[in-house]
Amino acid sequence: MLVISMMMLPPQVVIIPMYLFWAKQLDLSGTLWPLIIPMAFGDAFSIFLLRQFLLTIPDEYLDAARVDGCGELRTLLRVVVPMARPGIAAVALFQFFYAWNDYFGPQIYASENPGAWTLSYGLESFKGAHHTDRNLTMAATVLVMAPVILVFFFAQKAFVEGVTLTGVKG
């Protein structure tokens, strides 16, 4: 219930305390660390998606690994992680797309340091500087979109498999 309630909490509700924590207590304002560190631990959606995917792994596989003499860590690395690869890939893609398209976080934490701007924030700055040159703005937009399209194109099979298998008990 706690994870699901965190999914319903909009980030704008906690932005002031989070900014005070990152800027005043840790002195990391103007860097990308306030964006990187929370993403390394995952968000509520990723935790929920992986939990649902891991519930689909039959207990018989885990029991068979234990009977064969595997410890818990080896069972995790040799049985669970290979079977959960589609779910992990789906979560990794969701996290990548979220981080790539994030505009709110970089605007709050890194706006005073142009060296730490993300592409979405830099594209908006570029658009403001070249608002009459639509051809330059569109070219820059295509360059920013190209890596996302390529990542999705090459990882489409794992992404679709991870999303469709989540929540299906086998």
Image (cartoon, rainbow, N blue to C red):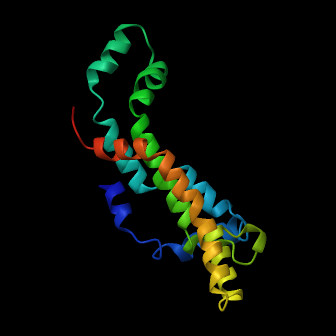
Left or right placement of residue 131 versus residue 43 in this view: right
Rendered-image quadrant of the N terminus: bottom left
Q: Which image quadrant for residue 58?
A: top left
Q: Can you say whether 29 is above or below 100 in the image?
A: below
Residue lying furthest top in this view? Answer: 68
Residue lying furthest front in this view? Answer: 135
| Residue 165 seen in the figure | yes
Rendered-image quadrant of the C terminus: top left
Residue lying furthest left in this view? Answer: 169
60 or 26: nearer the viewer: 60
| Residue 42 seen in the figure | no
Task: From the top left corner, tell me how far across and down residue 159 is, in percent.
Answer: 41, 46
Q: Which image quadrant for residue 23?
A: bottom right
Residue in the image at 48% along x and 50% along y: 153
Residue in the image at 48% along x and 24% along y: 77
57 or 37: nearer the viewer: 57
Left or right placement of residue 90 versus residue 38 in this view: left
Residue in the image at 70% along x and 87% along y: 130
- How many tags in the picture? 0
Task: From the top left corner, tell me how far across and down residue 163 is, in percent.
Answer: 34, 47
Task: From the top left corner, tell me how far across and down residue 42 is, in percent.
Answer: 49, 51
Q: Can you say whether 122 is above or below 59 in the image?
A: below
Residue lying furthest bottom in this view? Answer: 132
Residue in the image at 44% along x and 13% along y: 70
